[in-house]
Amino acid sequence: MYPIRPFSEDEWDAFCVVLSEAFNQEWSPVQADRFKQHVEFDRTLAVYDGDQIIGGTGVFSFSMTVPGGPIPVGGVTAVAVLPSHRRRGVLRTMMTRQLGDIRERGEAVAALYASEAGIYGRFGYGRAGDNLFFRIPKHGSAFRPDAPADPTLRIRVARPAEARLDFVKVFDSLRTTRPGYYDRTTSRWDSRLADEEADRGGDGPLRSLVAYDDNGPRGYALFRVRSRFTDHDIPDGEVQLYELFATDPAAYAGLWRGVLDRDLCSGLYAWNRAVDDPLIHLLAEPRYLNAGWLDELWIRVVDVERALTQRAYSAPAEVVIEVEDQICPWNEGRYRLVTAKGTCERTEDSPDLTLPVQVLGAAYLGGRSLMAYRDAGIVREHREGALRELSAAMEWDPKPWCGLVF
C-alpha cells in the first residue's frame, strides 16, 4: 500500500509533473501559478512511491446552487496518476480517502468534471448535468421574427479586463437561479479572463460584449475569434464562444446577435451550453444549431441524510429508499424521505425501491429522470409507482449546468 497525505506548497512543482504526464499537456509557468492560486493545500492529497509523488488530487470549497438554493460542496479537481503507476490501486486509494475527508468537512455532496466519462461511476459519482455544443453557420443563424427586443438596450464592445466588474455583477445576480452554478472567487475570475499567449490556443485575444441600459449591465459575452481566409481570400473566421449570460430575454438575444453577426466570420462554435439553452427556441431553423450532447457535471452524494434534506423538491413524495454504496459504507441502508416535511431519516421499514448511490447523485441536481434507470435494470422498484413518485419530486427547472470547468 502506497502512503497518502496532503502535499505541501513546496511540492507543487512535483505535483505539476504528475498533472502534465497524466493529462498529456504542459502548462506555462504563468498558467501553473494561476492554477496554484486556487489550490487549498490542506485539501490536497498525494500518493507516494518513496519520495516520488505518483498521484494526486485536490478539493475546492464551493458554495454551489442545488434545487432550493446554495449549499457547501466539495469541488474535486486535478485527479491524476502517473502512467507508470496505473492499475495499482492508486486512484481508488485517493478517491476513497478524499470522500472520507469531504464528509469530515461537513460537505454532504461532492462534484467534479470528468476527463473520461467512464471513470468516476465506480467511485459513486453520477452524471448529473449535461451540456450542448453548437456549431452555427452564419447563413443559418437568423432568429424568429418574434425574438425579444428592447429599444433601451445597448451593446458595447469592451476589453474584458476593463469590464470585469460588469461580468461579476451579472453572474452574481444569476448564481442562485440554476443548479450547478458555483461562487466565483477572485482567482477564478482571474483564470476566466486570462489572456496570455498560452491561453489562446492559436486563436485571437479574449474579447467581450456587454449588454446594458441606464440602470447598468444586463449581460455579457466572452469569446475569441479564430481568424482565417479561404484560398480565394474569402473570410472564413469562427467565433469561439466561452460564456454568454444575461438577466433578461432581450439582453440574451442581443448578445447572441452580437456574436453571431461578427464580421469576417462564417460561423460560431459554442462548446459548453445548457441543455435548455433558450437559443434553441430563438433560431428560425434550429437544425442549424448542429448541436451535440456531452456529459458535464458529476455529483457524488457523500452523506445521504444530509444531502437529501439540503435540497428542495418539485412534488410531494414519501418513499423508503434503499441505498447501495460500496465506497462509502456509512451511506448503506434504508432512508425514509418525506419531501413535504423536508426530512430524510434512517429506517428499518421495507424499501419501496433500491438504487446505487450513483443514481442518487445523477438525480440530485434535478436534471435526470429516474425511470430510465429502472428500464436499464439499474434501479429495482419494490412498490409500484414509487420510482415515478421520487423522480417527479427530484426533477427541477431549469436544468443543471455549471458552465465553467473547475
Image (cartoon, helix red, strand yellow):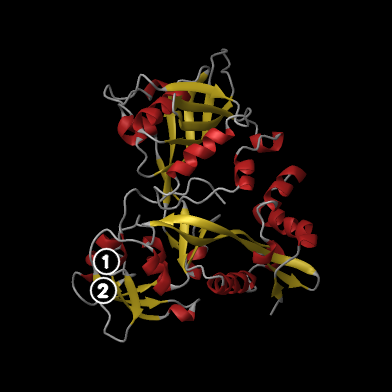
Which of the two discs, 2 and 1, labels the residue nearer the N terminus? 2
Query: Can residue 323 be seen in this snapshot?
Result: yes
In the rendering, which numbered label is found on residue 319?
2
The answer to which quarter of the image holds residue 341 is: bottom left
In the rendering, which numbered label is found on residue 250?
none
The residue depicted at 61 percent of the width and 37 percent of the height is 193
The residue depicted at 41 percent of the width and 57 percent of the height is 128
Q: Residues within 10 Å of mark 1 (few under 14, many from 20)?
A: many
Q: Residues within 10 Å of mark 2 (few under 14, many from 20)?
A: some
Q: How far is the residue under mark 2 from the one under mark 1?
A: 7 Å
Image x and y of residue 54, in percent:
72, 66
Q: Are marks 2 and 1 in contact (CB under 8 Å)?
A: yes
Determine the secondary structure under disc 2: strand
Image x and y of residue 79, in percent:
62, 61
Front residue of 66 and 99: 66
Front residue of 111 and 23: 111
Badge 1 is on which residue?
390
Q: Amino acid at mark 1?
A: Leu
Query: Can residue 113 be seen in this snapshot?
Result: no
Image x and y of residue 326, in percent:
47, 78
Q: Amino acid at mark 2?
A: Val
Left or right: residue 302 compared with residue 14: left
The residue depicted at 64 percent of the width and 47 percent of the height is 187
The residue depicted at 50 percent of the width and 56 percent of the height is 63
The answer to which quarter of the image holds residue 257 is: top left
